[in-house]
Image (cartoon, helix red, strand yellow):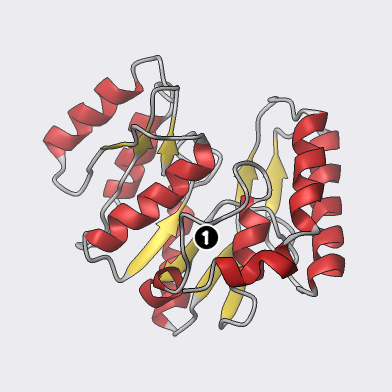
Amino acid sequence: MPVANEEGSIGGVLQQIMDLPYDNLYVYPVMDNFSKDGTERIIREMEQKYDKIRLIFHEKSRGVVSCYLYGFKMALEAGAERIIEMDGGGSHLPEEIPQFIEKLDEGYDCVWGSRYVAGGDISNHPLYRRVLSSGGTILANLVLGTKLKDMTSGFEAFQRPILEALDLDAFLSTGNMYQTEMRFYCRNCRTIEVPIHYIGSESSLKFKSVKEALRILFQLKKYEPNVRR
């Protein structure tokens, strides 16, 4: 769970996760120097209250994607058998975590949160961001040969061996293509999409980011052997 400048939401998100009926559900918020508000203080207070919350500070962070991947590595080092990735800013709903765990229990290797399967939804998201997201999924499926309804969602879950089989330091993406890159590498695993309600924001997406995503998209097939262990 990467976190940065989330003081208005992180306390509630963590509390909702702690209220779920699981004895072995640990939360690893990953923070870097980009966060300038009271997020760290709030998480530290929650750490004192719950031993299942452990703040990780990523000193060599290169952005949100490096925080995702660093969090995976820390969870694997801690012995986690299953790992869930989600945002800490309220865009992903903690009450939807159980469906990811249920599918892992059923034996799926990867569980993808999807805004575009039956029951999925998006709110508070600009139209152009919706178009880019859905259009990006269509293009990614065409280029990569994948068949998912949502190639860009950041709410997902993995069995331990899936992440162990990947060199998490070798990912090409440092931005918006990361989720697509991960789905491509996991395309031959036993996967399933589950519906999520994504709560967006009014944040803008720069043309430079779109251009970079397209560049990476057309490199993934050739680059894949560099990520396989």
- Left or right position of 67 against 132: left
- Left or right position of 87 against 39: right
Q: Quadrant of residue 120?
A: bottom right
**Depth order, front residue of 76/28:** 76
- Left or right position of 61 against 18: right
**Depth order, front residue of 42/71:** 71
Q: Position of residue 20 (x, y in %)?
A: 31, 55
- Residue 200 in view in this figure: yes
Badge 1 element: strand
Q: Which residue is at 72% across, 60% downward?
A: 150
Q: Which residue is at 21% across, 29% downward?
A: 44
- Residue 114 in view in this figure: no
Q: Residue furthest top?
A: 37
Q: Which residue is at 80% across, 75% downward?
A: 145
- Left or right position of 18 against 195: left
Task: Say what amino acid the circle numbered 1 marks.
Answer: Glu
Quadrant for the N terminus in the image? top left
Q: Which residue is at 33% across, 48% downward?
A: 17
Relative to 21, is 205 above or below?
above
Relative to 20, is 200 above or below?
above
Q: Position of residue 229 (x, y in %)?
A: 46, 74
Q: Quadrant of residue 205?
A: top right
Relative to 221, is 17 above or below?
above
Q: Position of residue 226 (x, y in %)?
A: 57, 66
Numbered disc total? 1
**Depth order, front residue of 173/201:** 173
* Category of crowding for the residue at label 1, using alpha-carbon neighbours closer than 10 angstroms: few (below 14), some (14–19), many (at least 20): many
Q: Which residue is mark 1?
A: 156
Q: Position of residue 103 (x, y in %)?
A: 47, 76
